[in-house]
Amino acid sequence: RVSSDGKPPKFQPPPKPVIIDRKTQKEEKRFLSPEFIPPRGRTDPLKYYIERKDMIQRRKVFNIPEFYVGHVLAVTTADPYASDKSKRFVGICIQRGGNGLGATFVLRNVIEDQGVEICYELYSPRIQAIEVLKLEKRLDENLMYLRDALPEYSTFDVNMKPVPRMDHEEIPVNKLQVRMKPKPWSKRWERPKYNIKGIKFELPEHKMKAAQKWSQPWLEFDMLREYDTSKIEQKIRKELSEELEK
Amino acid sequence: MMPIWTKSGEKHAVTLLKVQDCHVLRYLSKEESGGKTAKLLVGGKNVSPFSRPESAHEIFKEAGVPRKQKVTTFNVTDDAIIKPGTPLYAAHFRPGQFVDVTAKTIGKGFQGVMKRWGFKGQPASHGQTKTHRRPGAISTNKAAKVYRGKKMPGKMGNIYRTSFGLKVWRINTKHDIIYVNGSVPGHTNCLVKVRDSKLPTYKDCNKNPPFPTFFADGDEELPEDLFDEEIFQFTDPSVTFA
């Protein structure tokens, strides 16, 4: 190389090879159920460890499949008052809540023009089977707005056959924009606090602008609200994989 | 607090209590203590010895035990006396037993009469001048005085309270944890005193408890988890009604 000064050119070290560890990346992308991640608080981590041991015990005996909000599930529970002693309910999962053993999920369906929502506990011993009928994620993590949407978006056939899953890698995201019933709604879904992307708002422009008055743009920069779960998740994943292999 | 399910599918809420470094510190006979029964001083969680004066260390030096955060007394019959210095474990209690739990409640500071005593206050509108959360009248005309113990605003919480008759559902001998039914006074990670229940309904409840206490160096080898008969254990398959 020709240098302008007459001195030898500056030594540039060769670029460092980037090592992509595919195994750890794959492990990180694998699904970890949200109830395993402990919430932020002053509780002793021993309590979460013992709860996790119980949860793993239950998962060894009873298979709890991987599912997200937006999947269509069929749940069979034991019921002493039913004729067959068991009840089957099909519905779309609206929200997943709770931590540890008390984790719950809400299934919604419209049966004979009546909207029905049932909240089940994942680790309750009365649940006999959970089947995932249709796998699809939605744009939001909380589909409570389906209560104010047109009933066609919440109806699912009770005798639906499970849709076969194509790949073992991706779960399709349904970018459906739901149409709503006329206002008033149970919650003001157009406000930025709910951050909903799955509704087709047919409201006039000035109303959408007025709703932006309640936006709190400083919240995403608030450092006290940060809760970095990556290291906790890694530990929990390791623990889970070790225990489930036994 | 955690949920627990019975074999019939009902859910109960349960509090986890950890037995952390409990040792018997001193024995006081009936005459010494001046009560109806003999007393045993028991110390709780270990704490650094540098924050208190040397004079307070005597009890702990006698028993040969590190400094404890809390020291409580238990009334004990003469045949249940334990030598000072023995450690106490969670296996002292058995599932199916009933227990009283005492602790200092969460301190709420200086509180008004509505929160502290549950008074109804006054309406928010209809002409009320500057009076919405006040106690109103404090005595009658004839009394011409305010009685002692009148409910008034003051410091609320941070006092010892007991929940009686709590069932013990499960005991973890490896980590020394007692699973006690329902809620317990105090904030998370606070020190708590657990005692056999003195309610008359549960007087004859204990079937062969470890007497005087559970000794770890004895011959008995307990399994890691002790469950009550009615608990649904997660190793069993799901509940079905026949």
Image: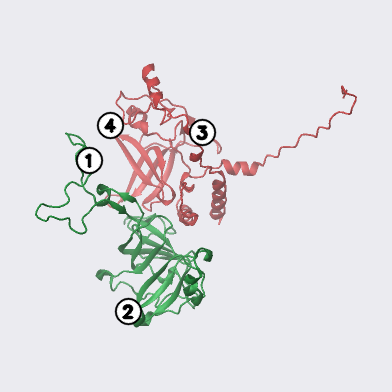
Question: Could you say which chain is coloured green in the image?
Answer: B
- Residue type marked 1: His
Q: Do the numbered discs 2 and 4 sit on residues whose CB atoms are within 8 Å?
A: no
Between residues A24 and B139, which one lies in front from this camera angle?
A: B139
Between residues B27 and A86, which one lies in front from this camera angle?
A: B27
Question: What residue did someone put label 3 on?
Answer: A221
Q: CA distance from mark 1 to mark 4?
A: 47 Å
Question: What residue did someone put label 4 on?
Answer: A113
Q: With A241 as the anchor, is B104 left or right in this view? A: left
Callouts 1 and 4 on one subunit: no
Query: Which residue: 16% across, 48% down?
Result: B137
The local crowd at label 2, few if under 14, some if 14 to 19, many if 20 or more residues have their Cα within 10 Å, is: few
Question: What residue did someone put label 1 on?
Answer: B132
Q: Chain of mark 2?
A: B
Q: Chain of mark 1?
A: B
Question: What residue did someone put label 2 on?
Answer: B34
Quarter where residue A25 is shown: top right
Q: Chain of mark 4?
A: A
- State which mark lies toward you, 4 or 3: 3
| Residue A183 to residue B36: above or below | above
Q: Can see residue B36? A: yes
Q: Chain of mark 3?
A: A
- State which mark lies toward you, 3 or 1: 1
Location of the C terminus of chain B (image quadrant)? bottom left
SS for tag 1?
Answer: loop
